[in-house]
Image (cartoon, rainbow, N blue to C red):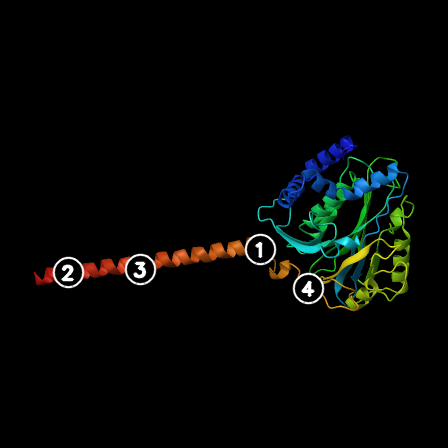
Amino acid sequence: MESHKDQYDDFCKINKERYPDIYEEIRGIAAGAEIKEEWAILLMLRPEVEALVAAEKNEVYANENCFDIISNTKDGDAFIAHNEDWTPAYKPFGFVLHENMPFSTTGATHITAFTYPASPVGFTFGYNDKGVVTSCNGLNPIPCRPGKLGRYFINRDVLAATSVQDALDRLRKAAKDSALGFGMSIGCVGSHDMYHAEMAPYDPHSSEEGGYVDIIKIKRGETYLHSNAYTHEYFKDINQSITPSTQHRLQRAHEMDDPTTPEKALAILGDETTPVYPIYRYGIPPDELATISTALLNLDNATVTIYGGNPTRFDPVVVMPLYNPETKGDNSFGAPFIIAICLAGALLIALIVMIVLFLAQNKRANSRSVNSVYQRVA
């Protein structure tokens, strides 16, 4: 940041202009964590900064974090399964964060996601009160474009989408100004409408400057495996770095049974057959990363199951409900709920008014009756 202040300022300017609420959220994290605001912003720009530093040193940026499985079977459940891989030192510190944003005007008001200290939500796996579910994998396109939209900012924005279509629209809107790239799995609770997106800082089929996102639909009866390499047909000729770990993990996953059930998906994510570059990782050299957590996000039964250890050997740490708009299970006061409360209140007020009028009418009638008796007596 200090030696490349112009690049840092350009990154800050475009991301603040495009995502002002997210930028303020990061400033708030910095204030709450009592760290410098610049440090929190740099955490948001970590992939881009690491890629640019590697390029300056004539090295290859090697993002090899995470593994995704999308399963949209005909007769079984639709689900997204995810291995969250990162530096082994993070193992004790990953956590699930719930954000309540009742005054949000840009999307969901409740977001829940796995994250790390002083970091935002959105770039691992998460879900919101509109039923939208996402998970992400890092990619290594060459080159990175300085002063453009950071991957984490885009991921965080998509996690706030109000629907699957809104999520795809947000990706398309961000693509032209993307600085780097990533893979993203997207689905919705109670639906088999599932997609996978790959974003890149340039379009390999165009001479015009600007990034591009390719989105494929995972149809009923299909499964899809994704790690840290571009695998969409559209990006088959893109300039990218693929690490040995990525190659081994993808190859081993394709050798195993098609992940048509949650059990088969967890068997893939927990596989340690390859001794040097296993799918489930421990940070044993030459592999520098470890699997911090494993998640199974089931869109049919609306649950997320999170494992702290290998899912083939350990019980989950927690099983939580996903927000399900169909059953109003989002713990928020949606418009239908507010309307129902207002109608009930109006009926109650009307009933009270009727009772008061009835009592008042009876009182006047009784008063006239007594006066009539007095007059006859007189």
Image-based side of 339 in relation to 163, left or right? left
N-term mark: 4 or 1? 4
Q: Which mark is residue 332?
A: 1
* Residue type, label 1: Ser
N-term mark: 3 or 2? 3
**Element at badge 1?**
loop
Nearest the camera: 258 or 352?
258
* Residue 132 seen in this snapshot: no
* Residue type, label 3: Phe
Cα gap from disc 3 to disc 2, whole angstroms:
21 Å
Q: Which residue is mark 3?
A: 358
**Element at badge 4?**
strand
Q: Which residue is mark 4?
A: 318
* Residue type, label 2: Ser
N-term mark: 1 or 2? 1
Estimate the x, y position of residue 252 in percent, counting from the top left. 89, 61
Nearest the camera: 192 or 198?
198
Q: Which residue is mark 2?
A: 372
Estimate the x, y position of residue 142 in percent, counting from the top left. 87, 41
N-term mark: 3 or 4? 4
